[in-house]
Image (cartoon, grey):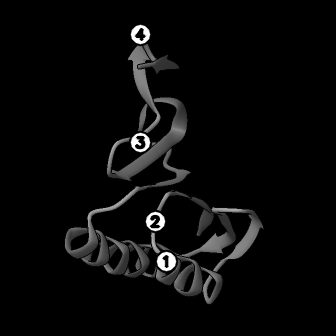
Amino acid sequence: MALTIIVTRDVEMRYRGFLTSVMLEVSPGVYVAPDMSTAVRGRVWNVMSDWWQTLGRGSLTMVWRDTAMVGNIRMEVLGEPAKKIVDADGVLLVKRK
């Protein structure tokens, strides 16, 4: 289990209703779950992916700890992120568009 964070931007209200049923909304569009299992995280992402494929508006970013990845962070993104994360010799950096 790992801390999971989801950030939504310019998406329909259905995402908010769904995400608040499984996570805490700590700021508008920012959801956290301190101990979300891999299975639950996968199901949540599948629901959001299906909706996004149909609706196609805004963007969603999910982040959680993964020690197998550079910087120990894994990210999944739907839509156009506001920033791009790049690997610079094992260090994650933010590249603004």
Tell me whether circle 1 and circle 4 mark residues in contact (CB < 8 Å). no
Task: Give the CA distance from mark 4 to mark 3.
Answer: 15 Å
> Could you tell me the amino acid type at mark 2?
Val
Q: Residues within 10 Å of mark 2 (few under 14, many from 20)?
A: some
Q: Residue under circle 2?
A: 11
Image quadrant of residue 42?
Answer: bottom left
* Residue 14 shows in this picture: yes
Q: Residue at x 66, y 72 (%)?
A: 35
Q: Residue at x 58, y 69 (%)?
A: 1
Image quadrant of residue 49?
Answer: bottom left
Task: Give the CA distance from mark 2 to mark 4.
Answer: 34 Å
Q: Earlier in the sequence, mark 4 or mark 3?
A: 3
Tell me whether circle 1 and circle 2 mark residues in contact (CB < 8 Å). yes
Tell me whether circle 1 and circle 3 mark residues in contact (CB < 8 Å). no
Q: Residue at x 59, y 74 (%)?
A: 36
Query: Which disc, if any, is residue 89?
Result: 4
* Residue 91 shows in this picture: no
Q: Is residue 28 left or right of residue 49?
A: right
Nearest-to-viewer mark from 1 and 2: 2
Q: Residues within 10 Å of mark 1 (few under 14, many from 20)?
A: some
> Could you tell me the amino acid type at mark 3?
Ala
Please say if 88 is above or below 59.
above
Please say if 22 is above or below 66.
below
Task: Give the CA distance from mark 2 to mark 3.
Answer: 30 Å
Task: Give the CA distance from mark 1 to mark 4.
Answer: 36 Å
> Could you tell me the amino acid type at mark 4?
Asp
Q: Position of residue 65 (x, y in %)?
A: 56, 50
The secondary element bearing badge 4 is classed as loop
Q: Residue under circle 3?
A: 68
Q: Nearer the viewer, residue 35 or 79?
A: 79
Q: Position of residue 8 (x, y in %)?
A: 53, 59
